[in-house]
Amino acid sequence: MIARQLLLFSFLASAGTALGQGTTVPFSGMSHDASLPVEIAADNLELNQGTGTAVFSGGVQVAQGALRLSAEKIEVYYAEDDNQSSGSVESMKATGEVRLSNGAEAAEAETAEYFVADGIVEMEGSVLLTQGNNALSSERVRINLVDGTGTLEGRVQTIFDPATSQ
């Protein structure tokens, strides 16, 4: 256990990182194109036209371009605004083994909400981010897919591999 703590400390010291309550990090590999179609596959689907929602459950997988989102359950909320086309996806709320990925970058959490038009993903609960050999953890993360940034909050811990960090 002590050797593991020393290894963690040496990674942090050599990369010049620190533990904190809020940290902003780049997500250069996470990209977003709201004009691309959203594809969803699941074991089950419940539709409610009255509320403009669809609930996908059972091994749900969502794809929009190279961006991937998976979870046990995803609730999809459709836009009702006259400025958006009928039936367009406004947001998605994912629960249960949530994973967001795009290439070598990935994020895992207990829950996530994806605001499609804005390109914002908010994840909560035992968040783990990986970027190649680097890892970050916290309780919450807000990822802006448009500008490629993310903000972590709640006891942020980082491990950066100096051999792969630039």
Image (cartoon, rainbow, N blue to C red):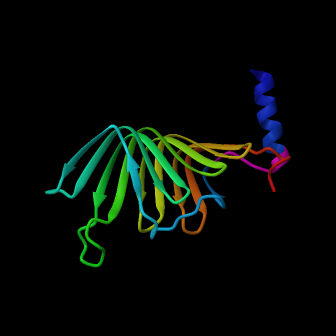
| Percent position of residue 86, x then y | 25, 70
From the viewer's perspective, is residue 31 above or below residue 56?
below
Highlighted magenta segment, given as a residue range: 14-20
Queried whether the magenta region covers residue 131, the answer comes back as: no
Q: Is residue 116 left or right of residue 99?
A: left
| Percent position of residue 45, x then y | 27, 43
Residue depicted at 72% across the width and 47% down the height = 18
Residue depicted at 41% across the width and 68% down the height = 117
Q: Give whichever of 118, 52 is nearer the camera.
A: 52
From the viewer's perspective, is residue 124 above or below residue 147?
above
From the viewer's perspective, is residue 107 above or below residue 27?
above
Q: Is residue 121 left or right of residue 101?
A: left
Q: Give whichever of 141, 69 is nearer the camera.
A: 69
| Percent position of residue 111, x then y | 42, 43
| Percent position of residue 142, x then y | 51, 56
Quadrant into which the C terminus falls:
bottom right
Q: Is residue 1 left or right of residue 34?
A: right
Residue depicted at 13% across the width and 57% down the height = 50
The quarter of the picture where residue 71 lies is top left
Quadrant into which the N terminus falls:
top right
